[in-house]
Amino acid sequence: MAVTETYTVKRKGAMGKIITSVIVAIIILIVAISGTAIVPAGHTGVVVTLGKVSESTLAEGFHLKAPFVQDVVNVSNQIKVYEIDAPAVSRDLQTVSSTIAVNYRIQSAKSAEIYRKIGSDYQAVVLTPAVQESVKSVTARYTAEELITERSSVGEQIKDLLSSKVEEYGVQIEKFNIVNFDFSAEFNAAIEQKQVAEQNLLKTKTEQEQAKVIAQTEAEKKVIAAKAEAEAILAQAQAQADANELLNNSLTGLVLENKMLEKWDGQLPKVNGSDSSLLLNLDDAIGSNANAKSQTQTKTPAEQPED
């Protein structure tokens, strides 16, 4: 009986030691877990000691901290997309409904400051009112039509103004996009009518230019044809003049030959000297022939020799 009681006491003592060891291990594990912190990638660890935010921050990775005294809040420094509707009024008093998309991130160096001053709801506290104010301010500088034609410039101005408003809080604007500009139905109809009128005017101008080019081409063709015709007429007239001149020369030669034949006395040319050169004097021949005929005509029948 005593042995049994002794065994029971020993057994209970062993169980108590095991339980105590387990409890101590659990406590040590809890303390160990409480004394360590892991900051994930793209985040900054903000150290809070008994509710007070420390100026120093923790980078990515594994860190030790005071158990049950310090807490580490992970603030994301990754780029986030924030989309919001921002109504505004243009310079010509047209209602403009804009959809804005903003890519932003929290600067690592100011993670502790923004957590201490604003908390984790910085999007609603800082970003939303700054976006609304910036959109309204820049939109009021432009007419509704200019907002459409100069959309890129408008977006850059809104981004610059927005950056200046939120930079002091540690919010950095990476990219700003105007997803959509929407106007009233009346304004959209007026824009459509204007575009149709501009297209018709451009079409009319194009047709006029084409007609002008065609008319100019036709005029040039007529000038070229007229020049060609004039040159042909001139060449034909020159050819006719040359033919007439040749014919006149031929007729003149024939007349002279005919006159020479009429005045020829029928005698052959005389040879003078041993070189057999032919000396023909038309004037002498014509004169001698004339004298001979004159003498023949003046002789009386008695003076004529008898046969």
Image (spheres, rainbow, N blue to C red):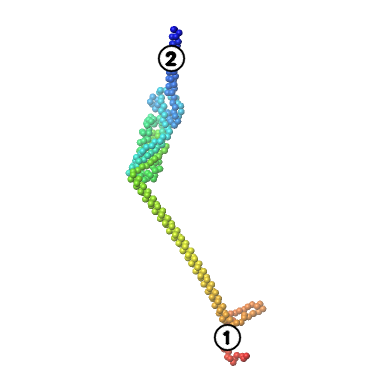
| Mark 1 closeness class: few <14, some 14–19, many ≥20 residues within 10 Å | few
| Mark 2 closeness class: few <14, some 14–19, many ≥20 residues within 10 Å | few
The reply to whether residue 161 is visible in this rendering is: no
Q: Give the answer, above or below, for where 13 lies relative to 135.
A: above
Which residue bears the numbered disc 2?
A: 16
Residue sitting at the far top: 2
Task: Compare residues 170 and 2 and report the one nearer the observer.
Answer: 2
Q: Find residue 21 and report its image quarter.
A: top left
The numbered mark, 2 or 1, whose residue comes first in the sequence reads: 2
Residue sitting at the far right: 274
Q: Which quadrant, please, contains the C terminus? A: bottom right
Q: CA distance from mark 2 to mark 1?
A: 191 Å
Residue sitting at the far bottom: 302
Of helix, strand and loop, which one carries label 1? helix
- Image location (x, y in percent) of residue 263: 57, 81
At label 2, the amino acid type is Gly
Which residue bears the numbered disc 1?
A: 293
Of helix, strand and loop, which one carries label 2? helix
Q: Residue at x 44, y 24 (%)?
A: 36
Q: Report the side of 131 relative to 301 (left or right).
A: left
- Image location (x, y in percent) of residue 87: 34, 40
- Image location (x, y in percent) of residue 227: 47, 63
Q: Residue at x 41, y 38 (%)?
A: 175
Mark in front: 2 vs 1: 2
Q: Give the answer, above or below, for where 283 lies relative to 120.
A: below
The reply to whether residue 123 is visible in this rendering is: yes
At label 1, the amino acid type is Lys
